[in-house]
C-alpha cells in the first residue's frame, strides 16, 4: 500500500471529537513546504530534524458532523513524547508561568471560589483532578486553598517540578481508575491529545454524582476560513504538531451529547468588582454561555 505518511506519524481517519467518519479535506500540503517548515523551525528553534517530516503531509480535515477540524497525521506516541519532553522549550514554557502576575493567580482564586459556591461545599470537602497539570501552578493554588487536589501529568520534568509542592500526582492513566472527583479541570489540553472523545469518556467515568468537568480549548470558529492562498502556518487554534484538534462551541456540544453530558450554564456568573466590570461582565457572561469554548459539563440524569 502506498502510505501517505512515514513511520514517525499515525493516521486518524475518523473525527477524534465525535467519531464520525463523514469528513472532508480542508488543506493538504507536505510538512516540508516552506509555509509550514519555516514555522516549525522557528517555533521549535530548529530542534526537530527534517527527516521526521519526509513523505508526510500537513493534512487538515473537517468533520461534517460536529464541524470540528483535526490534523489527519499526528506524531506517534513515542515522537509525541519527544515533542513535549524535548523539542518544546521547557525553559520558555516554565518561564510563562514564572512570570505570572497577581492578576493571573487571582483568576485561579476567583474560579475556585465559584466552584466551591456551585458545589456548595467547603474546599476541604471538594476533590479535584487537574487533567494535564503541567507545571502545577493551578493545582498549587487549589492546594493552598485547602481543596483536595490531584494532578494528572505525563511529562517527567513537569512532574518533578510540581512534586515539590505537595500535590498528589498521577502519571499513569490506569491509576485513575479507582478514584472519583467532584470537579475535573482541564485547561488547554484537549486540543493537544490524540483521542479527545475517549479521554472525555474516561474523565466522565471519574465524576462523582453532581460532579462537574471544565474543559477549555482555543476557539477555532474561524479556523477553516484561514486556509486561503496566503496562508502560512502560525501559532493558532490549529497549528502543526501541537494543536491537532480544533474545536468550536458546536463541536464541544456534540461531543458532550454523545457522552450523555450536558453543558451547564452560569457557573461563572458575572462578578462586579468595579465600574468597568458593569459593562464588561455581562458581555463576557453572554459569550461564556453562547460561543465560548470553555465549558462546564455535567452528567445527564
Ligand atoms: Zn466530529
Image: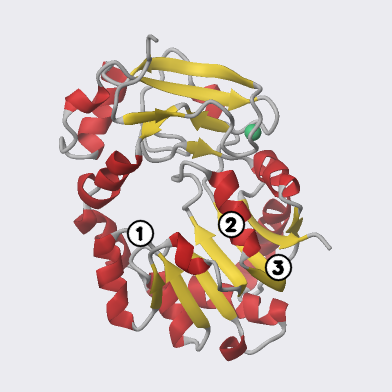
Instruction: Tell me the residue at 52%/43% (across/down).
Output: 195
- Locate residue 190, reporting x and y percent: 51, 49
Judging by the rendered image, the residue that carries numbered circle 3 is 267
Query: In the drawing, what numbered circle is on residue 101?
Result: none
Instruction: Choose mark 2 or mark 3, whichever is in front.
Output: 2
Earlier residue among tags 1 and 3: 1
Say whether marks 2 and 3 touch (CB < 8 Å): no
Q: Do the residues labelled 1 and 3 touch (CB within 8 Å)?
A: no
Is residue 106 visible to the viewer in this orientation of the structure? no
Query: Which residue does the image show at 21% across and 34% down from the upper left?
Result: 42
Label 2: few (<14), some or many (≥20) within 10 Å? some
Percent position (x, y) of residue 130?
49, 67
Distance (Cα) linking label 2 and label 3? 23 Å
- CA–CA distance in space, label 2 to label 1: 16 Å
- Reading the image, the residue beneath label 2 is 202
Q: Which of marks 2 and 1 is nearer the N terminus?
A: 1
Question: Which quarter of the rendered picture does the N terminus lie within?
Answer: top left
Residue drawn where x is 38% and y is 40% of the image = 242
Residue topped by disc 1: 154
Q: Quadrant of the C terminus?
A: bottom right
**Horizontal side of residue 49 vs 188, given as left or right:** left
Q: In this view, does 53 lie to the left or right of 271?
A: left
Q: Which of 190 and 203 is in front in this view?
A: 203
Amino acid at each position: 500500500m502506498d502510505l501517505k505518511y512515514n513511520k514517525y506519524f499515525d493516521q486518524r481517519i475518523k473525527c477524534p471529537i465525535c467519531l464520525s467518519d463523514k469528513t472532508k479535506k480542508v488543506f493538504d500540503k507536505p510538512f516540508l513546504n516552506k509555509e509550514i517548515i519555516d514555522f516549525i523551525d522557528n517555533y521549535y528553534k530548529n530542534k526537530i530534524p527534517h527527516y521526521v517530516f519526509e513523505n508526510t503531509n500537513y493534512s487538515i480535515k473537517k468533520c461534517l458532523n460536529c464541524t470540528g477540524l483535526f490534523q489527519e497525521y499526528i506524531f506517534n506516541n513515542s515522537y509525541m513524547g519527544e515533542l513535549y519532553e524535548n523539542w518544546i522549550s521547557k525553559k520558555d514554557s516554565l518561564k510563562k508561568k514564572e512570570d505570572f502576575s497577581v492578576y493571573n493567580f487571582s483568576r485561579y482564586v476567583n474560579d475556585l471560589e465559584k466552584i466551591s459556591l456551585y458545589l456548595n461545599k467547603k474546599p476541604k470537602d471538594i476533590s479535584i483532578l487537574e487533567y494535564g497539570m503541567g507545571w502545577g501552578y493551578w493545582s498549587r493554588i487549589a492546594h493552598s486553598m485547602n481543596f483536595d487536589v490531584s494532578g494528572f501529568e505525563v511529562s517527567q520534568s513537569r512532574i518533578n517540578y510540581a512534586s515539590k509542592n505537595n500535590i498528589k500526582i498521577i502519571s499513569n492513566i490506569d491509576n485513575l481508575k479507582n478514584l472519583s472527583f467532584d470537579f475535573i479541570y482541564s485547561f488547554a489540553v484537549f486540543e493537544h491529545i490524540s483521542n479527545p472523545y475517549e479521554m472525555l469518556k474516561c474523565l466522565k467515568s471519574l465524576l462523582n454524582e453532581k460532579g462537574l468537568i471544565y474543559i477549555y480549548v482555543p476557539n477555532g470558529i474561524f479556523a477553516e476560513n484561514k486556509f486561503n492562498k496566503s496562508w502560512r502556518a502560525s501559532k493558532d487554534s490549529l497549528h502543526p504538531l501541537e494543536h491537532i484538534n480544533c474545536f468550536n462551541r458546536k463541536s464541544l456540544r456534540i461531543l458532550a451529547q454523545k457522552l450523555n453530558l450536558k453543558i451547564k450554564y452560569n457557573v461563572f456568573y458575572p462578578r462586579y468588582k468595579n465600574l468597568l466590570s458593569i459593562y464588561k461582565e455581562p458581555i463576557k457572561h453572554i459569550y461564556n454561555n453562547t460561543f465560548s469554548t470553555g465549558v462546564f459539563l455535567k452528567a445527564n440524569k
